[in-house]
Every structure is written in C-alpha cells, then in structure tokens.
Image (spheres, rainbow, N blue to C red):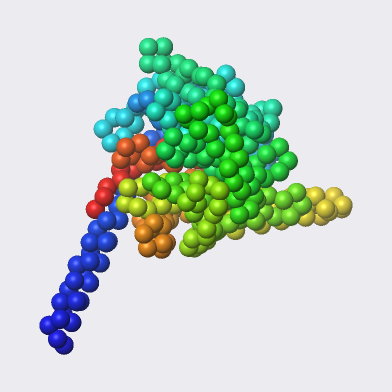
Amino acid sequence: MTKQHWMGIIVGILFTGAVNAQVGRLAWHKTITLPSMQHGKAHIGLAGPIAGIAGDCLLIAGGANFPDLPPWEGGAKKIQKEVFIYRKEGAGLSLTAQDSLAEAVAYAASLSLPNGLLVIGGETPDGKTAACRLFKYEAHTKKIAVSDFPDLPFPLANMGAVVHGNKLFVAGGEGQDTVSDQVLQLDLAHLEKGWTSVGKLPYAVSHVQLLADNHDLYLLGGRKAYPDSPSTLYHELWRSSDGGSTWSKRADIPFPAAAGTACVLPDKGIWLLSADQGNTFHQVEALIFDAKKESHPSQRQKLIDAKNQLQINHPGFGRAVWRYDLKSSEWKQMDDLPSDGPVTTTAVVWDDLIILPSGEIKAGVRSPQILVATFNEQ
C-alpha cells in the first residue's frame, strides 16, 4: 500500500471524526411535573397546550384532557384555561406564578416572539378559532396580559407554524370541516396587511411540523383525516426555499410521523423527538368507522369494545429520537428520551434548553411531565 493511500485513509478518518463531532447531543435532566390541580388532585397532563417563551419566562397554558374519565369509559374531553409560568433555575425550571386564560384554548400554534408568545388559532369550547393573541407575563402583577394580533383568514387548529426572519408562516391545519393545504404568511413589519396566502402544500395536512433554518422552510410528517375512512399519515419531508411558494421533496422519514415534536438545532439537524407512527391509531379509526356502519346493536358493541381495548392497551409512541442532517440529507436514530415520548405538544427551544411540555403519551392519556434537556455541541 502506497504512502499516498495511507495518507488518504488517515485524512478520511480525521474528516469523518470532524463531521461526527459536529453532531450535538441532548442531556436530559430531572423531570418536572405540572403542579397539582384544584383540590390537590395530581395533574393529569395536557394535549395541545400553548407553550413558548414570553420575555424571560416559559408559559404553558390551555390544552385539553379528560379530567373525569378516560374516553373509553365515556369521559368527556375538556379544554382548559390554566396558565403555568416558569423561570430558568440553573439547567432546569422553577414555577414562578399561575394564572388563568379568559378563554380556554387547545391545539393552537405557539410562536415565541421578542415581545411575547403569539398564540395562533386553535380550538375553544365553541369550536375552532381564527383568533391570534400575543401573551406577555407581567411580573409586577404575576398575571398574563393579552393583546390582539391580526386574525387568520379562517379558523385553524393543529397546524404547523414557524418564525422565519421577520415573517410568520402557518402551514396546513384543520378547519371547521376540511383540512387545509394553504401556506399563510404574516409580515411582522406590516401587521396592517394581515395574513396572506403565499402558496400551497403538496397536499392538505394537519398535525404537521413546520420548521426553519437560516435559509429554508421544512414541512415534516402530519396526517389527513377523512369523514368515512382511516386517516393518511405522512412520512415525507419537504423543503421550500422561496418562502412557502413551492416545495421539493427531501429524504423520507423512516416511518409515518403525525402530531410529532421537532426542532432545528445548531448542529444543522432537524431533531424529531416523538411522533405517532399510526399503527394503533389506524386500527382504532377502522373500528370506529366499522361500528358506525354496523346496524346490529350487539355487533356494534363488540366493535366498540375492541376499540376500547386497543386504546386501553396502547403501547405508547416510543422513546426513540431521530435526527435529519441538513447537510447530508440523511436520517439517523439518536439516543432515547428518558420517558414515553409525548405527541401533540410543542418542542420549545430556550437558549440551550430543549423543553417538551406535557402532551399525549397514549391514546387519551396525557403526561403531566415537562421533559427538559440541555443541547451540547460535541
């Protein structure tokens, strides 16, 4: 073997080591739990909570759960009003105050802006809403102050949303009776113009992630519901380099990924921290549709019982964390989460902290845990 050949191998090894060293890691801290509810009852957690940074505080608010009975026992979903305000304490969080929203809301998009936390759309006890409101925490009163932002052109919930420069983008989402394929934009420098449609997605989708790096937008996973058949769950990753007008397909996620939590981190990676891969979800949907079509009462009840058992025995959404490298366009499985992965929540990036606040860990089951990690670049 020639000297030049050996030198090539050594350079290749060194280069590979340098590339690998650029990939960060997440160091998970001691789990925090949402405070007890009224009458001292332990918190059961929230799906679709408002979550993000307002000033120097983390806000977790609203969301939905089943406070009395699980859905398979006939329990009713309730949209909540509570607000929990946290400050940083070392590498963790400390509860500093609690408040209540004027109107309960869940499944909204939450965007952390320099002047507050913007809550976009969502679902209220009266249905889906187009309202957009900016939340600020006033330390002297220990209360949340709310101001109006331009409303969406139509009600939406469970959509993707991201801040990109001085513009806000919303993609997809569930309307009153349809699933949206629209990309909406709001220019922070010209709020008077309101939200405008700047493009269409490759397909209508909800429960989707919309992310951004310094240059591009990324659309990740999601699902589309149908009135009389099981939903489509997507494993696609799309990129837009022109502000949402056109989209190009990137490397597929290794599995369908709906209602997930994801973020872009400084190691040039999209980190997918959790997602519903749809196996149990599709089985439950199929039994629901079969039960609706079944005319014989005893057969219908058998289908309902089978659906309930699937929900009761739901295996959860797993703990595996995946990373997509924006340079190599490859997916790789990383370390696991410290506990069951929450879906239908928002991954909040706060300096070097990554926060997963509450969320759904099984069908109809929420987690009261707030998972916190420090991101370290190796």
Picture quadrant of residue 324: bottom left
Residue 92 visible: yes
Q: Is residue 8 above or below residue 250?
A: below
Q: Position of residue 253 (x, y in %)?
A: 49, 60
Q: Give coordinates of residue 77: x percent, y percent.
A: 64, 34
Q: Is residue 352 left or right of residue 45?
A: left
Farthest-out residue, left: 3
Q: Quadrant of residue 174?
A: top right
Number of numbered tags placed on the structure image? 0
* Residue drawn at x 61%, y 48% as measured from the top left: 200
Q: Residue 325's quadrant in the figure?
A: bottom left
Work out which residue is located at the far bottom of the displayed protein and give it. 1
In the depicted structure, whether residue 143 falls above or below residue 124: above
Residue at image position (44%, 46%) is 212
Residue at position x 44%, y 34% in the image: 166
Q: Give the quarter of the figure containing the N terminus.
A: bottom left
The structure residue drawn at horizontal position 35% and vertical position 52%, both measured from the top left corner, is 268
Q: Can see residue 221?
A: no
Specify the farthest residue to the right.
295
In front of the other: 28 or 271 = 271
Q: Percent position (x, y) of residue 130?
A: 63, 30
Q: x and y percent of residue 154 in the render?
A: 66, 34
Front residue of this view, candidates 203 and 345: 203
